[in-house]
Amino acid sequence: MATVETRNIRKSFGSVQAVNGVDLSTKEGEFLVLLGSSGCGKTTLLRMIAGLEKPTSGEVLIAGEVVNEMPPRARKIAMVFQSYALYPHMTVFKNIAFPLKAQRMGTEAIRQKVEWAAGLFGIELLLHRKPRQLSGGERQRVALARAVVREPAVFLLDEPLSNLDAKLRASARDELQQFQRRIGTTTIYVTHDQVEAMGLGDRIAVMQHGKVRQIGTPMEVYDEPADTFVAAFLGSPPMNLMEGKDCLVGFRPEHFLPKEAFPMTGAAPVPFRVTRLEYLGADRLLYGVLERPFPEQKVIARLPSTVSIPIQPGERYEFVVQEKDLRFFDRDAGHRTEARPLVAQFA
Amino acid sequence: MGPLARLKYWAADRAHFAIVLAFSIFSAFPFYWMIITTFKRNSDLINRDNNPFIFNEPPTLEHLRVLFHDTLYGIWLWNTAFVGVLVVGITLILAVPAGYALARLSGRWGEHLGIGIFLTYLVPPTLLFIPLSKVVVGLGLQDSLWSLVLVYPSFTVPFSTWLLMGFFKAIPRDLEEAAMIDGYSRLGAFAKIVMPISIAGILTVVIFSFTLVMQEFVYALTFISPVKQYTVSVGVPTFLVHGDVYFWGSLMAGCFIASVPIAIVYNFFVDRFIAGFTVGAVK
């Protein structure tokens, strides 16, 4: 087991800055998720840690040692690619045995290790098959078994679930987490899927334009976003942001509820004209605009099915947000600022 | 299925069969013609009243006797094979790394360089043999098979490089990178992963280069005078066409014997090629 650290790491492709000064450090055995939309530099960052890309500047440390000049094979890492990258001309057994062969391990030892790894993922019966004879889920397990088999110090996973269908993805997510907890290997996981990131990560590093905008536990990045990007990126639908007098005021759709849902609160009512309603089973999404004294701005409310107050599109309702659920951001820079009274912002 | 749909299906099926049949006949006919001419008596061959597609008189081995006893055909075959094997070897040694480097060279450079290399293949030997003859004489290789070993890669390497570049480009980079993470150097990943997957491309290069060597005429004619150093492509037309007298039976026998091994290897390779066994590598 080991930790991974990057120090002011940068990578540019021509004039494009893919990774722009990232400082990151995992804890021992941690599951760290790099989250961001495509093109944010998360995969490039992972590839630099793996040694597949050379940083333009900065350092990568694995287990406290600078590995910039080490080839990928010397870094004691294992990587699962988005495409799985199974060797098409080899059977599953040979695919899993491949890293062990590179270590010149004996035939009998290889057989035992391969069977152990295959057992971890329940693919013992597939060992004689070729990758093309496997389903997507099976291929993913083979790729994981190949990564595990030589007991690496660090796991690097590049969107390993994105090629699975939605149902399989949920169960694979569960298995992946259980497995990581069991073997306790430090893991860096790249994804653009916030549900995956929230569900799997011990910590999440939210990336944009080659920079880490915030790093924290799922709860921290969701509840205490460091800036408007993180606030709008996480959550579906994202945080509502209103322009106040000297700051931006944000609140999550699920905290924006009819006044009747909070009989005890002293919070000021917010007039809300509903224009459209989406019934999603567990929730109702209400699209609408705020009315005076608030700026006439589109916001979204998310009502859990436990709030059964009838709502009609076209009608005006009184909604509230509790003070503790309001987040304030700097209007220009977008970063978090101190809390202030809501009413003063829209007087 | 309604009767109309069934008729349509039947017609499509027949049309498919007819097309395949037509192409099969088209491809097989030269072989049939070579075989039947090889064993026909001259009197049968030149009588215009005979049906040319069948034996009208009993077959004969006379043309084969002429080919093997009155000419040095056996030696020419050996010479051709000797040059062919060496040229194929040289081509692989140069074109495999070159094709791989071009395939993985990032940016527009790789593509432009690849096209540039391919263009050199289009310069015809009828232009090149004059400057190349100076090179051959300068090295003292005239009248030696080694002159051909030297010159032939000038057209096999560019085409093979270009061909292999396409094959290597089709291999996902992920596979090599996975191998590099799994404990191999780039060279090791190339040998263990890229080469076995591109076997169809490498076989294509082998067959293609060998065929080019077998059919090359201009260089072989200009650089080599001694009969013993001839290749099949020069020896057969030189010795079996006397003025306007064509030894048709022996000519066809010479061509048939030289083309059969290539045809067999080619058929073997076509199967490998169609198998498309990179399916399932990624996704």
Image (tube, grey):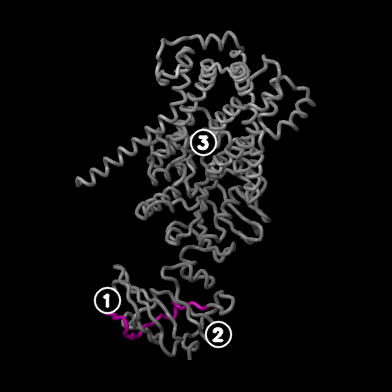
User: Are the residues flagged by discs 1 and 3 in contact, CB closer than 8 Å?
Assistant: no
Tell me where the magenta segment starts and ends, as one range.
A309-328
Q: Which residue is drawn at 67% across and 56% down?
A: A58
Q: Mark 3 points at which residue?
A: B197
The residue shown at (62%, 50%) is A53
Q: Which mark is residue A308?
A: 1
The residue wearing badge 2 is A246
Chain letter for the residue marked with disc 3 in the picture: B
SS at circle 2: loop
Give the amino acid at mark 1. Ser
Cα–Cα span, label 1 and label 3:
61 Å
- Say whether mark 3 and mark 1 are on the same chain: no
Could you give the CA–CA distance between mark 2 and mark 1, rounded to whole angstroms?
36 Å
User: Can you name the residue that lies furthest to the left here?
Assistant: B2
The percent position of residue B196, horizontal first and vertical second, equals 52, 33
Q: Residue at x 68, y 25 (%)?
A: B148
